[in-house]
Image (spheres, helix red, strand yellow):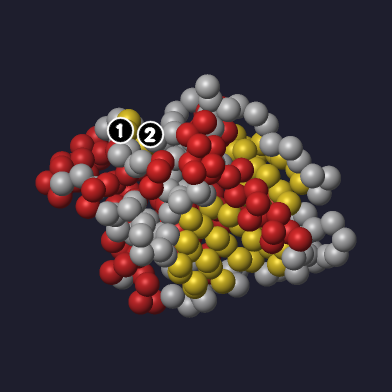
Amino acid sequence: MSNKSEPTLLPNESIEWVKYDGIEYYTRLYNPQDSPAVANLIIVHGFGEHSDRYESLARHFCKNNFRVLAFDMKGFGRTGRKQGQLGGIGQFDKVYKQINHFANTLLLQKYSDTSKLFIYGHSMGGCIVLNYCAVPEYASSISAVISSAPALKFDTSATPPAILVSVLKVVSRFLPSIPVSSKTNPDDLTSDPAEVERFKQSFYNFNVFNIGSACSMFDEGDACRLIKAKSYTVPCMVVHGKGDKV
C-alpha cells in the first residue's frame, strides 16, 4: 500500500502551494529558529522522487542557520499528483526560470537578513543545478552550487540504445508528452534497505517520465559535460559514488 501521509512539521517549518506559469507547486520552507539566517539554500530533487525525501538534510542545514527552500518539481511528487500529469518536467530552460523565480520571490526578496544563495541538487536535480549556474543571468546571484550524483551520463544498463535515443528525440519534437517507464531499480538508489523500502512505499515516488523531458535531460547532460563545465564562474562541488548503477 502506498504511503500518502503528510510530513510532520516542526514549528519553524511551513508548507505553501505556489502558483507559477499555471502550475501549483508544493513548497516547504525551513527557517532558522534562534538566529538570523547566514545564507539561503534551495534543494532540487532528483527523477522519480520528491522534496520531502530531503527533510533530514534540510533540517541539518537549518540547524546551522541556513534558510532552506525545497519544492516538488513539475510532474513529480505532490506537484505532479495534484497536476495529474506525472513525469513531465518540461523543457529545462523553463525549469531554470522557475527556480530563479522561486529564489527571488520566496527567499531573496522576502527576507533581508542575507543575500547569500546556495543551490543543491541530486541526480536529475544535480544536472539541473549545474546547468542553471552556467547561465550568466542566474549565476550572478549564486554563492555556490553542490551537485551530488548528477545525471550527466547514464549507466549503459539504464540507457536505451543510441539508435532508440535518436528516434525518441525526433518523436519528442511532435509528441513530447508520451509517457515512458524508467528502468531505474530502487535497490540501486541507496545501500540502506530501510530507505529503499520507504522509497518503494511512497505515493509520491514514481518511475514515469515523458519523452520530451527525458530527451531534454540527455541533451542537458551532454551540454554540461562537454561545454558548460568549462566556463563556470560559480564555485561548484560535485560528489559522486563509484558504485552508482544509475
Residue sitting at x 83%, y 65%: 36
Could you tell me the amino acid type at mark 1? Val
x, y percent for residue 111: 78, 59
Q: Is residue 91 above or below residue 68?
A: above
Q: Is residue 194 left or right of residue 64?
A: left
x, y percent for residue 23: 55, 35
Residue 101 seen from this side: no
Q: Is residue 218 above or below residue 80?
A: below
Q: CA distance from mark 2 to mark 1?
A: 6 Å
x, y percent for residue 68: 68, 56
Q: Is residue 223 left or right of residue 17?
A: left
Q: Which residue is mark 2?
A: 208
Residue sitting at x 21%, y 40%: 168
Q: Say whether marks 2 and 1 touch (CB < 8 Å).
A: yes
Residue 196 seen from this side: yes
In the rendered image, which quarter is residue 131 located in?
bottom left
- The residue most toward the right is 34
Q: Which of 93/225 is in front? A: 225
Q: Earlier in the sequence, mark 2 or mark 1?
A: 1
- The residue most toward the front is 193
Q: Which mark is residue 180?
A: 1
Q: Is residue 139 above or below residue 106?
A: below
Disc 1 element = strand
